[in-house]
Amino acid sequence: MSIRNVRTSDAGRLAEIYSHYVLDTAVSFEYEAPSADEFIKRIEHTAAKYPYLVCEKANIVAGYAYAEAYSKREAYSWTVSTSIYIDKDHRREGIGTRLYASLEQELQKQGIINLLAGVAFSEEEDEYLTHDSYLFHLKEGYEKVAHMKTVGKKFGRWYDLLWMQKKICRDDSRYFSYDNRGKAAHES
């Protein structure tokens, strides 16, 4: 297994991996699977500022993870939302753990402190949604910080959304300073 930065040439494979989560599960709240062309746009937009990584196994992309801005407002500059998707035939092989570890290393280099992950949830598992994503994020050190009920409707059913958070730097003072107006600014 190897982890590397995404390329736009990966778009077709990423679209293939993600389509399972859109069409067959409630993990994603999208209804239509994006095309490879749409994935190129998403890759270019995200990778321009944040890490977007893929995991290759036997020279085939088996999963991907990325971070994006949690909010456009300046005060959130040290907080990102993370996403991860593993090929349905390569789950439980350690790919997710390796991707998230690499993603966290890259985000720490950028001075990111907080990781947030939105996780679809239902008290009772069903054929569209298990507790796997929730349990994976707990295993990776995230904690549940919010539970929004019945916010996504898919397959004629309502699903909840959990916000999971992981702090990757305990000493946030080393990542920023303040100017004379109290405005936070990343250290250079």
Image (spheres, helix red, strand yellow):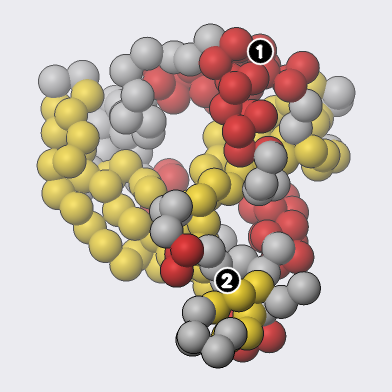
Left or right of residue 182: residue 25: left
Observer-nearest residue: 163 or 51? Answer: 51
Q: Residues within 10 Å of mark 1 (few under 14, many from 20)?
A: some
Residue type at the position of mark 1: Gly
Where's residue 102, x and y in %?
Answer: 74, 54
Residue at 52% from the left image edge and 56% from the top image edge: 80
Whole-Å distance between the Cαs marked 2 and 1?
A: 32 Å
Left or right of residue 49: residue 79: left
Q: Residues within 10 Å of mark 2 (few under 14, many from 20)?
A: many
Where's residue 152, x and y in %?
Answer: 21, 35
Where's residue 113, x and y in %?
Answer: 57, 71
Where's residue 89, x and y in %?
Answer: 61, 23
Q: Quadrant of the N terminus?
A: top right
Residue with the mark numbered 2: 113
Left or right of residue 157: residue 58: right
Residue type at the position of mark 2: Ile
Observer-nearest residue: 69 or 12? Answer: 69
Which comes before the other along the chain, label 2 or label 1?
1
Left or right of residue 21: residue 100: right
Considering only vertical position in the picture, is 162 above or below 167? above
Observer-nearest residue: 132 or 52? Answer: 52
Residue with the mark numbered 1: 12
- The local secondary structure at tag 1 comes to helix
Residue at 79% from the left image edge and 38% from the top image edge: 5
Considering only vertical position in the picture, is 14 above or below 107? above
Residue at 56% from the left image edge and 41% from the top image edge: 84
Task: Confirm whether residue 92 shows in the render.
Answer: no
